[in-house]
Image (tube, helix red, strand yellow):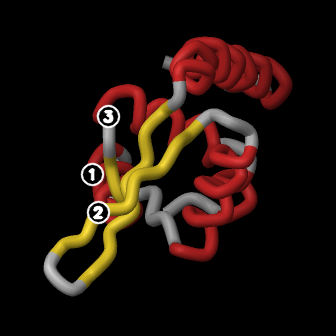
Amino acid sequence: MHSPELLKGTLQTILLKVLKDHGKMYGYEITQRVKELSDGRILLTEGALYPSLHKLEAEGLLKTETVMMGKRVRKYYTLTPVGKSLVKERVSEFVDFIRTMGNVLQVELN
């Protein structure tokens, strides 16, 4: 599992990309998809996930939809048009950062 410090700086980019690729999702569904994509190496906690989702929503990058599921309420998250347009830029910026870190740490990246 990766350290929470590394995850903190990348979580918004991860959330944007997962939502872009999978459309409307609820919190637990997002955590499971990230776990699956990372082969169990990234385990999102509620304490990390929901503040990031709320921040992205406050920035106008996500919108929410509340759906009743029996007696339970489920909140779904989807990207806004602004959020969709930002994903590619955020992912490119992160990939460039990884390359830069490879240079700084003098390691080859595959």
Q: Is residue 60 above or below residue 29?
A: above
Residue 56: image location, x then y, percent:
66, 44
- In the rendered image, the vertical position of residue 100 relative to residue 20, given as above or below: above
Q: Is residue 109 visible?
A: no
What residue would you read off at disc 1? 36
What amino acid does circle 2 point to?
A: Val
Name the front one of labels 2 and 1: 2
Q: Residue furthest left?
A: 70
Q: Residue 89's x, y, as percent?
A: 65, 13
Circle 1: is it few (<14), some (14-19), or many (20+) Cα within 10 Å? few
Secondary structure at numbered mark 3: loop
| Spatial CA span between label 3 and label 1 | 17 Å
- The numbered mark, 3 or 1, whose residue comes first in the sequence reads 3
Q: Which residue is mark 3?
A: 23
Q: Which mark is residue 96?
A: none
Q: Amino acid at mark 3?
A: Gly
Q: Give the Cα distance between marks 2 and 1.
A: 25 Å
Q: Nearer the viewer, mark 3 or mark 2?
A: 2
Q: Residues within 10 Å of mark 2 (few under 14, many from 20)?
A: few
Of residue 36 and residue 1, the one placed in the foreground of this image is 36
Which label sits in the foreground, 3 or 1?
Answer: 3
Return the residue found at the far right.
104
Above or below residue 63? Residue 30 is below
Q: Which residue is mark 2?
A: 67
Q: Residues within 10 Å of mark 3 (few under 14, many from 20)?
A: few
- Is 89 left or right of 1, judged from the image as shown? right
